[in-house]
């Protein structure tokens, strides 16, 4: 079944790759108006194929076949991110709405959800898992050992409170026993009325018929309301096939792990045998080929050629069915290009061009980069591997294919041996030039010296070179900077789809994004790149993300969800808290970023990020001085390399208190989380009541609760639910069901998000780089329209004057 289903997805993927060619031409030609819907269609189709392939990948057992599908999955993830960035650059907005496209493609809002691949957590490094156990043990020891100090007055007060509570419990127990004894006396004195058997039967019938009739009326009423659409119908439960798949998933994962371990053992075994048996033969043949190439080039050109560098492919680039003359011409052309690049760099340093020229160059570069995809070759390659190797094979063969594995390992062995041979032949070529041609390579030596000097300058001093990684981690745990993330999934962030967004945008009204849009963007910008090393290396991912919004919208929950979905380590940094006295800000940030780079993937969470970039520090934060982290934070962010899977997430409740320019220089990607709309509030009330142990009945008016909580956040709703559903109230739900009026009192004590605060967030968002670009684009369009009308009026006036 897996091969048939994959062949269907493969057919759909091939059609999609054929359809994508004309859209690239239109994008390159600059048709921005027509590219938006076409990019949206491509995005939705790729997302649909990615969702189905991820389910298929979890059902596959054969490790080599899984690797072919994994290559396609990584390519699809990267392509989805590329399309999203192109849509952002075209529409100048992080939020995109596909209401009209969903109807055309026969898709539901659930199909828009970004699926988080399940292999992110399963394929975490074993060393990191072992180290995580050490961290958890150290953290439990720390929490058990640390007892807060207490003064004498606080201890006396605590004893008084506990003694009063003990006396109150004794008094309550005495009153309970007294009431029970009085009830027992009344029961003994009360005598039931004397009834005849006929009268007793009539009373029992009355009670039973009344009970049965009430149940029937409630059932008929609910059926009628469901028929009219006043009450949502109950969703159907999972079918028998889904239940069987859920039962088989644990055993299937165990089988996949066993087959993966067997594949690794077979790979190591074959690699050792090939190195022992064929290693010397491969080395000798390569040396003979390279020597023969030396002699042929000398016979044709009269001198020995230049040996290609490792960046150009080494000796592998020499034997691609080319003559020695062609190879020598290519090498000479490469050297000329390198010299020209150096000359251009020198000219650019001397010349001081204006800002307009720089902007034009950057725009041209971005257009060239957008037209060329970095992930489509991977998708095509994985598709071709599956068609050539696995399409016509039997699914029942789940063991490792040794013949295919031998070919793959032979290529790896040849590459390793080729690197060793290239080093030897470079030295041999130098000796030949010295002996035969009597020439010395002074330029290469000076160039190597310059490169060495540059690399020495780039290297920074390690402040903790004498410390081990385990000791640094233990210190960060004890100081509270390395914490254990909460087990929260991204799907737990509740938010409904907005069905009126695209219609509002067509009417030139910018809609407020829903919480489901925020969930999708966090999955795209944080979860997918952080969980996949292939996507992180190739895609120009922004390693800083800012979540802005009022308190209670779920910023902290999203940070923990990113860590739990990707298995990342969480480093918590709050600039408002005082750091240890023996540490400077530079030393502290150096330790955090160093450990985060070693324990990849990692998330560095900066809480209250605006305090580091404030215009003036408030009086409450003058002791800790959060401004001390500003320069050191920029330096540590620049020290991150492309290979470091470290994501810096900042959360802020008051972003308008910070200077916009340095704030946006640090956080390149900004997401403004709004308050929930009506549909999201309705889903929040239902989900939070169930989470606290109370199933919402039909008598509970959730629609009215969602209506009166307009302006309240998810944190406010959760606080109101917990204040009402205490332990005593949960026990009496069977006797006295919940009513909407019970939640009004706790809601009245809270302050909602007022319109002035919401307006301040929108004004601040317009000051960010993306908001400024959008404002400029809107101005240009209005000026063009106005200019056209004014031009027509002037022409009419000129015609009238000529007639006169």
Image (spheres, rainbow, N blue to C red):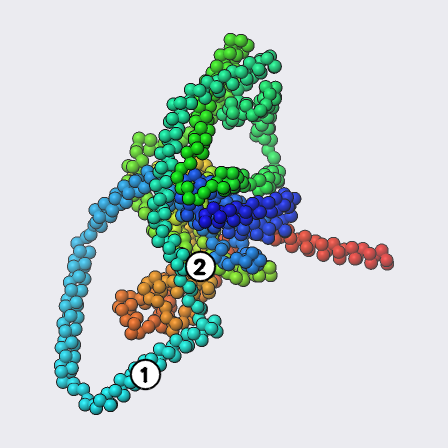
Does the image show residue 535? Answer: no
Residue 182 percent location from the top left of the image: 14, 79
Residue in the image at 61% along x and 44% along y: 21
Residue shown at the point (57%, 42%) measured from the top left: 370
Foreground residue among 92 and 410:
410
Tell me: residue 41, above or below residue 701: above
Q: Is residue 528 above or below residue 281?
A: below
The answer to whether mark 1 and mark 2 are in CB contact below 8 A is no
Which numbered mark, 1 or 2, is in the foreground of this view? 1
Dot 1 alpha-carbon crowd within 10 angstroms: few under 14, some 14 to 19, many 20 or more = few
Q: Which residue is drawn at 62% across and 49% down?
A: 32
Q: In this view, does 669 lie to the left or right of 504?
A: left
Query: Which quadrant would residue 235 be assigned to in this image?
Result: bottom left
Q: As drawn, is 118 to the left or to the right of 155?
A: right
Does residue 295 appear to the left or right of 70 in the view shown?
A: right
Which disc, if any, is residue 209?
Answer: 1
Q: Viewed as shown, does residue 348 lie left or right of 236?
A: right
Mark 1 / mark 2, whichever is N-terminal? 1
In this picture, is 426 found above or below 490?
above
Residue 437 at what x, y percent from top left? 55, 10
Q: Which residue is under mark 2?
A: 495
**Label 2 element class:** loop
Instruction: Please state the horizontal and vertical placement of residue 523, each as a whole percent of the image.
Output: 45, 50
Percent across and percent down for residue 189 are 14, 85
Q: Distance between the residues labelled 1 and 2?
A: 45 Å
Residue 153 against residue 441 in the figure, above or below: below
Q: Residue at x 16, y 79 (%)?
A: 183
User: Tag 1, which secondary structure?
Assistant: helix
Answer few, some or many: residues within 10 Å of disc 2's Cα (few below 14, many 20 plus, some between 14 and 19). Answer: many
567 and 122: which is toward the camera: 122
Using the rendered image of the protein, determine whether residue 35 is visible from the camera's viewpoint.
yes
Image quarter in which the C terminus is found:
bottom right
């Amino acid at each position: 079944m897996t091969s048939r289903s994959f062949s269907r997805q493969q057919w759909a993927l091939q059609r999609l790759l054929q359809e994508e060619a004309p859209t690239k031409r239109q994008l390159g030609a600059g048709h921005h108006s027509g590219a938006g819907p076409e990019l949206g269609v491509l995005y939705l189709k790729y997302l649909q194929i990615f969702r189905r392939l991820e389910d298929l990948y979890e059902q596959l057992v054969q490790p080599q076949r899984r690797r072919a599908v994994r290559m396609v999955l990584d390519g699809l993830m990267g392509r989805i991110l590329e399309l999203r960035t192109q849509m952002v650059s075209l529409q100048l907005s992080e939020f995109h709405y596909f209401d009209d496209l969903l109807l055309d493609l026969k898709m539901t809002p659930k199909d828009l959800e970004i699926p988080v691949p399940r292999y992110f957590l399963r394929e975490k490094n074993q060393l990191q898992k072992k180290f995580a156990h050490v961290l958890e043990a150290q953290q439990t020891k720390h929490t058990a050992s640390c007892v807060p100090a207490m003064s004498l007055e606080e201890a006396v007060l605590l004893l008084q409170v506990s003694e009063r509570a003990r006396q109150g419990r004794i008094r309550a127990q005495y009153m309970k026993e007294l009431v029970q004894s009085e009830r027992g006396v009344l029961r003994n004195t009360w005598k039931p009325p004397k009834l005849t058997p006929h009268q007793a039967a009539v009373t029992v019938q009355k009670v039973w018929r009344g009970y049965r009739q009430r149940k029937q009326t409630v059932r008929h009423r609910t059926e009628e309301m469901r028929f009219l659409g006043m009450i949502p119908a109950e969703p159907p439960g999972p079918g028998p096939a889904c239940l069987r798949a859920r039962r088989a998933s644990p055993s299937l994962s165990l089988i996949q792990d066993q087959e993966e371990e067997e594949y690794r053992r077979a790979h190591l075994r074959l690699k050792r045998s090939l190195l022992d048996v064929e290693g010397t033969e491969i080395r000798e043949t390569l040396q003979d080929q390279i020597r023969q190439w030396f002699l042929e080039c000398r016979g044709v050109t009269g001198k020995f050629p230049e040996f290609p560098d490792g960046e150009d492919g080494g000796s592998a680039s020499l034997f691609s069915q080319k003559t020695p003359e062609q190879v020598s011409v290519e090498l000479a052309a490469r050297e000329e290009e390198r010299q020209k690049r150096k000359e251009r760099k020198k000219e650019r340093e001397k010349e001081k061009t204006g800002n307009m020229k720089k902007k034009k160059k950057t725009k041209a570069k971005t257009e060239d980069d957008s037209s060329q995809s970095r992930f489509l070759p991977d998708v095509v390659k994985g598709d071709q591997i599956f068609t050539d190797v696995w399409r016509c094979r039997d699914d029942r063969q789940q063991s490792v294919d040794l013949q295919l594995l031998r070919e793959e390992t032979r290529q790896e062995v040849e590459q390793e041996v080729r690197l060793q041979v290239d080093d030897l032949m470079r030295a041999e070529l130098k000796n030949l030039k010295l002996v035969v041609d009597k020439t010395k390579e002074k330029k290469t030596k000076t160039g190597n010296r310059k490169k060495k000097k540059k690399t020495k300058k780039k290297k920074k001093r390690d402040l903790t070179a004498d410390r081990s990684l385990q000791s640094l981690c233990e210190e960060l745990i004890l100081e509270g900077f390395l914490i254990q993330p909460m087990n929260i999934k991204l799907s737990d962030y509740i938010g409904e789809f907005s069905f009126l967004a695209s219609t509002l945008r067509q009417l030139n009204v910018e809609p407020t994004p829903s919480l489901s849009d925020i969930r999708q963007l966090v999955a795209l910008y944080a979860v997918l790149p952080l969980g996949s090393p292939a996507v992180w290396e190739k895609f120009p991912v922004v390693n800083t993300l800012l979540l802005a919004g009022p308190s209670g919208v779920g910023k902290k929950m999203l940070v923990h969800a990113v860590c739990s979905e990707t298995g990342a380590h969480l480093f918590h940094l709050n600039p408002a808290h005082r750091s240890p006295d023996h540490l400077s800000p530079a030393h502290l940030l150096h330790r955090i970023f160093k450990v985060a780079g070693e324990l990849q993937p990692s998330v560095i969470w900066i809480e209250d990020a605006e305090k580091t970039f404030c215009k003036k520090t408030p009086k409450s934060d003058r002791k800790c001085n959060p401004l001390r982290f500003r320069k050191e934070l920029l330096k540590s962010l620049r020290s991150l390399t492309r290979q470091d899977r470290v994501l810096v997430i900042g959360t802020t409740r008051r972003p308008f208190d910070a200077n916009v320019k340095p704030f946006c220089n640090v956080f390149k990607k900004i997401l403004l989380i709004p308050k929930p709309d009506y549909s999201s509030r309705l889903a929040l009330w239902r989900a939070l009541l169930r989470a606290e142990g109370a199933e919402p009945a039909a008598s509970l008016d959730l629609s009215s609760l969602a209506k009166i909580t307009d302006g309240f956040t998810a944190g406010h709703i959760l606080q109101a639910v917990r204040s009402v559903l205490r332990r005593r109230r949960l026990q009496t739900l069977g006797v006295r069901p919940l009513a909407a009026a019970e939640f009004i009192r706790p809601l009245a004590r809270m302050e909602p998000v007022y319109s002035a605060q919401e307006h301040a967030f929108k004004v601040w968002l317009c000051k960010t780089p993306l908001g400024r670009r959008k404002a400029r684009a809107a101005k240009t369009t209005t000026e063009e329209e106005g200019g056209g009308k004014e031009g027509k009026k002037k022409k009419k006036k000129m015609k009238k004057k000529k007639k006169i």
